[in-house]
Amino acid sequence: MLSDQTLVSDIKAIIAQSKENAVRAIDHQRTLMYWHIGQRIFEQEQEGKERADYGKYIIKYLSAELQPEFGSGFSSRQLNWYRQFYRTFPIVSTLWTQLSWSQYKLLLSLRSDEHREFYIAETIKNNWTVRQLERQINTNLYERLLLSNDKESVLAVAKKEKLPSDAKEIIKDPMVLEFLGLKRESAYYEKDLEGAIIDHLQEFLLELGNGFSFVARQKRIHIEGDEFFVDLVFYNRLLQSFVIIEIKTHKLTHQDIGQLQMYVNYYDRMEKLPHEHPTVGILLCASKNDAVVKFTLPEDQKQIVASQYELYLPTEQQLLDEVNKELNSFVGKSGGE
């Protein structure tokens, strides 16, 4: 009987996988169709390049001819997307079968090839849905990683050209937790934020980054008769280490760092296996003073990371301000050398 159940289960899995493959194949053919349409429009434009408005004329003419027969997928706006698609990805062999047309449309909105390379690699590696890719773009994942890491490291880790050697290569600062649905004007206790994270664990794992899995909440540890409770414990298979998260809804203090350091030391000495790497501790805080973090911890330490959380999406201006701050800091350092 057990063998029969296994047979049914296996066949159901084969059917589901075949359906998924068929849907993906159809979508890829549709993507290729849009690419070839974009190529043909571009080639026609080039033939009439001496006329500045020829491109607009071609798009309007094609839409009027095609839309009545083939529907809204051939409106002027959509035909412009197809042209942009070809111009952005001019070599058809570079198109990925794992990406849908909806995902390619999101990628077309990015301002540089490096952005696209990063999000393509992450989407394929993590099997992101359209919604997940859109959220990562909207929360500026690429920019947030670049603020604390060099560009080459970010791209290399994304493409699996190297494994992360430092937790800071995959842990974001700030973390954007808008999916928790907490109002920005309200005051929250740490247990409220922790509870919301558990309720939205899948989204939180996506925000944490690659390779994370949940281990425990309010993990009780005993140290010489005293009891302590660790807020959240995760494991990261890329770092091959435990990751402890302590939540602080106030501005970070050196006492908070000391508390987390104790938990990290405990896990290193009592839980970590010989083949595993040192435990990583993340202080998820409402705000922080980087100088306090720097002078509380030993130089060149890689185990404690302070990450500020945001309960709502950053505006474009806020992101630009952060980037400009980093650029000004870099220029200042270069000028002083």
Image: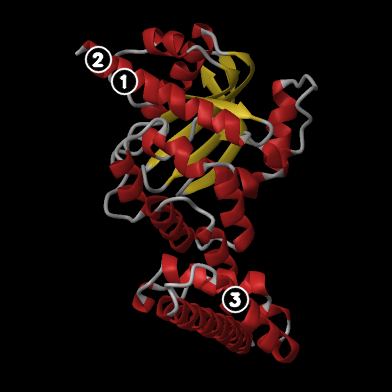
Residue 294 lies in quadrant: top left
Residue that extends furthest to the left in the rendered view of this protein: 337
- The numbered disc on residue 335 is 2
Q: Are marks 1 and 2 in contact (CB under 8 Å)?
A: yes
User: CA–CA distance between discs 2 and 3?
Assistant: 52 Å
Mark 2 Cα shell of 10 Å, populated few (<14), some (14-19), many (≥20): few
- The numbered disc on residue 20 is none
Query: In the image, 274: left or right of 107?
Result: left
Query: In the image, 151: left or right of 233?
Result: left
User: CA–CA distance between discs 1 and 3?
Assistant: 47 Å
- Label 1 or label 3, whichever lies nearer to me, is 3
Residue 160 lies in quadrant: bottom left
User: CA–CA distance between discs 1 and 2?
Assistant: 6 Å
According to the picture, the residue beneath numbered tag 1 turns out to be 331
Give residue 168's position: percent from left, percent from top.
39, 33
Q: Is residue 255 above or below residue 5?
A: above
Give residue 27's position: percent from left, percent from top.
57, 80
According to the picture, the residue beneath numbered tag 3 turns out to be 57
